[in-house]
Amino acid sequence: MRKLIAFLQQDISVFGRQKQKKLPLVRQRTVIELFNNLFASGFHLGEIVDFLKRSQLLADPYTQVLSDGLLAGKPFSSLLADLHFSDAVVTQVALAEVHGNTSLSLSHIQSYLENVSKVRKKLIEVATYPVILLGFLLLIMLGLKNYLLPQLEEGNVATVLINHLPTIFLSLCGLSLVAVLAGLVWFRKTDKIKVFSRLVALPFFGKLIQTYLTAYYAREWGSLIGQGLDLPQIVGLMQEQQSQLFREIGQDLEQSLSNGQSFHEHIKTYAFFKRELSLIVEYGQVKSKLGSELTVYAAECWEEFFSRVNRAMHLIQPLVFLFVALMVVLIYAAMLLPIYQNMEL
């Protein structure tokens, strides 16, 4: 009864704000670019939000979210969280608010979102035509199964395979969907350190995940250390961030440091970081240049990550075309083999 009364007493306008749509990736990059340019021009956060509202560069529902956040006294990172930016972006901005180099962090985020947008666009371009081909192929197989194959002789391997292929294909799609949903449930309920430690063991995606996480954490640690923060301060900040993995690593590092284990030794135990990261940390601590060493290494890892993604994009389309070609050969075999068998008789 109390919950019902509290529900009825809520402001009706809240429900409209709760259904706020997430900004598209391209618009996210534009928003980050606008904030970066306006910050560089000397605007403070309140002036930027007012400028965005007056200029209509951002839709009214989004500027209203920003205005409400400012009135509530929220920092810039929390405003981005209200606009449904990813945890990775929100965490980077939150850390930038601590180390003070917000402009550089926004530039990194802008570059990252631009690369992700290009990869997504390329993936759509690469996948669209093969998906259409697969759709037509499935329709052809269904037509063959219902109209042509019943008129052909039984016992032909190709005929039997084509006859059952639509069922097999749809069953595999259904099983894949169930597996994805089960994976999402497991991802949400399991500790993120365990999740990513297992994900990096995947044959192809593991290397991508490992390279991404190494680049991300190396850059953030490099920025914080470069601004003079020591490890206990960094570990404390990590536990306050939006990203669950960030918080878990912060808690784990705090416990290991309190037990007397060095930073680079404990990093080596994380399977989702590249082995070179612990070596870079150890070398940087010896040379007292850990911040700059991590920043340079992070740039190399980001370049490697997007290079791997682009190479993967170029492999997807040929593999799908090869599968379609094999299916076409099977279709011809299903139609022609019975004819040749009748000719021999």
Image (cartoon, rainbow, N blue to C red):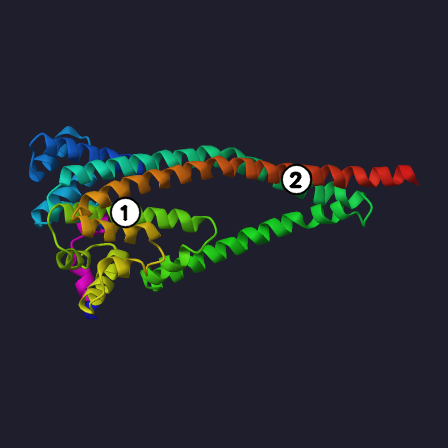
What percent of the width, then of the height, locates residue 212?
33, 46
Q: Is 308 situated left or right of 243 in this image?
A: right
What percent of the width, then of the height, locates residue 30?
24, 33
Q: Secondary structure at mark 2?
A: helix
Placement of the C terminus among the 4 image quadrants: top right
- What is the number of the mark on residue 92? none
Residue under the image location 22 percent in, 54 percent down = 242
Instruction: Name the residue furthest right.
Output: 345
- Residue extent of the magenta highlight: 5-17
Please state which of residues 204 and 264 is positioned toward the viewer in this rendering. 264
Q: CA distance from mark 2 to mark 1?
A: 41 Å
Can residue 59 be seen here? The reply is no
Membership of 187 in magenta stretch? no
Please state which of residues 293 and 226 is positioned toward the viewer in this rendering. 293
**For the residue carrying disc 2, how many other residues have a C-alpha within 10 Å: few (<14), some (14-19), or many (20+)?**
few
Residue labelled with disc 1: 216
Can residue 46 be seen here? The reply is yes
Residue labelled with disc 2: 326
What percent of the width, then of the height, locates residue 28?
26, 38
Give the amino acid at mark 1: Tyr
Q: Is 224 situated left or right of 160 in this image?
A: left
**For the residue carrying disc 1, how many other residues have a C-alpha within 10 Å: few (<14), some (14-19), or many (20+)?**
some
Image quadrant assignment for residue 89: top left
Q: Earlier in the sequence, mark 2 or mark 1?
A: 1
Please state which of residues 258 and 233 is positioned toward the viewer in this rendering. 258
Prevalent SS, magenta region: helix
